[in-house]
Amino acid sequence: MASSKDNVTSKQKNKGEEISSIWDNVTAADLKEIEQFSEGYIEFLTIAKTERKVLDYVRMEAGGNSLHDLSKPYPNRRISGFLQHHKKLLGLFRQGKASVEEGFNIIVAHGDSPRLDLKPKCIYEDGTLGLLKTNLYGGLKKFQWLARPVALWGFSALKDGRTIDYTFGERSQDPVLTITDILPHMDRKIQREKRLTEAFPAEKLNVLAASRPLPGKANDDKKRIKGALVKILYDKWGIREEDLISSEIEIVPAGRARQVGLDGSFIGGYGQDDRLSVYTGAKAFFSQSRPAKPLLFIIFDREEIGSYGTTGANSNFIERLASAAFEASGLEPKWHSVLKSLSLSRAISADVECGRDPTFKEVIDELNSARLSYGPCLTRYTGGTAKYGASEAAAEYMAKVRNIFDSSGIRWQSSLIGKQEEGGGGTVALTLAEYGINIVDCGAPVLSMHSPFEISSKADVWMTFKAYAAFFEKA
Ligand code: MN
Ligand code: MN
């Protein structure tokens, strides 16, 4: 892959971050590369709308890159491989020239995105309509999910051990689903005069699913519309109503990710937080076939709800992955050796940043804002006001990462999420920092974050890939 180094003058290079828009500094060859990279990314966003699908995609690439499944027997030599948990948390390991005992170059991202899940008991009818009850997952703005086409992505585990994977509402010939809203003529008391946080109760986010009852007598109380819904589930996918208790069914925005803008310079789509980092991180990982240091790339789950659970960053997965990497290197994963190796490691928490939106300037600290098309953001600390809940990268580590980027011709910027006392947010950086790992947040700026249609810049997506590759290569 060509480097953009040649396009950066030495004067600009010395200055490092925040020079000018990437678009001002690309060659015709770069532009072609940007378009190609965007195409692949748009396709990925379109086919990987759940954490399981994200992992399917990356695992497939891992197989193509001859990574062994480290949970299974493998040849008795130094190998690279992957480890997963519940097919919702995945870690990739690549051997480096240096020993794993000296630490890893690590990039971590998350594969989950804010969404609506169907509740275990979700099918009901009311009046003439059949509906599905949802449960919020992650910090979404509820009103953004009303009156728009949504799709259903399901995974059911049956008692006999079979699993069933299904999608509804994505093919153009399929019907879609939707969540209804009240007309403005009648919303005065229940929405307009209320505070936003109270105007859209979570329990009102019901998916409109059916209206045609099973055959029967009018006015009988046999719940014939619910019956019809139950029958559709069985006819389409072989799922009985009780199987919904062991199902993960996600309601996500329907339709393809798209190019956006009259100039087509943006990418719009659901789940760019944090699949932008997953895609660019995975591509960067696979671009390094013989790195100097051993590499880890981890896609955590459950980041959007606080990283709890067996597939979240708060689990002991990183210890198990590092131990597996020791074994795959012919070394005994002694507890203190693994912990020492982690403490010597260098990491990036790859997560998207709040982009500067001129329409919402009032929450942005101009000096530290993340500008679209200025490259990935190095965010020294996240958290809330007064740095609560923040893992702050040490000055020396910031200097190291700056140097890596500048010496690789990476266009990047230093940024913070926004003004103090306006809110805040955190990432998995905190969890890794607990092992003494040097870690900094670094990801592309996006607009409309956590919405059904998040916006990124094609130039940033491409440069983020290059930044992650430079980190894997040189950290
Ligand atoms: Mn995120
Ligand atoms: Mn998020």
Image (cartoon, rainbow, N blue to C red):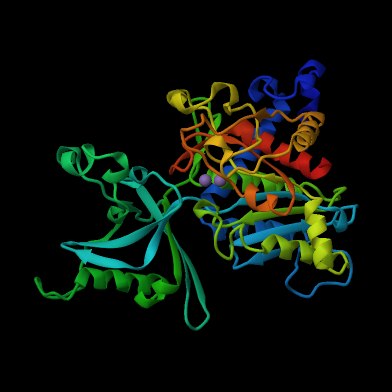
In the rendered image, residue 350, in percent from the top left (x then y), is placed at 65, 44
In the rendered image, residue 365, in percent from the top left (x then y), is placed at 53, 25
In the rendered image, the vertical position of residue 223 relative to residue 468, given as above or below: below
Is residue 282 visible in the rendered image? The answer is: no
| Residue occupying the far left of the picture | 219
Res 228 → quadrant: bottom left
Image quadrant containing the N terminus: top right
Q: Nearer the viewer, residue 115 or 427?
A: 427
In the rendered image, the vertical position of residue 283 relative to residue 421, given as above or below: below
In the rendered image, residue 178, in percent from the top left (x then y), is placed at 32, 52
In the rendered image, the vertical position of residue 58 relative to residue 234, given as above or below: above
Q: Is residue 431 left or right of residue 365?
A: right
Q: Nearer the viewer, residue 26 or 28?
A: 26
What residue sits 47% from the left and 33% below the top? 421
What residue sits 70% from the left and 39% below the top? 393
Q: How many marks?
A: 0
Image quadrant containing the C terminus: top right
What residue sits 66% from the left and 29% below the top? 414
Res 26 → quadrant: top right
In the rendered image, residue 340, in percent from the top left (x then y), is placed at 82, 57
What residue sits 46% from the left and 28% below the top? 363
Res 99 → quadrant: bottom right
Q: Is residue 308 left or right of residue 394?
A: left
Is residue 246 visible in the rendered image? The answer is: yes
| Residue occupying the far bottom of the picture | 160
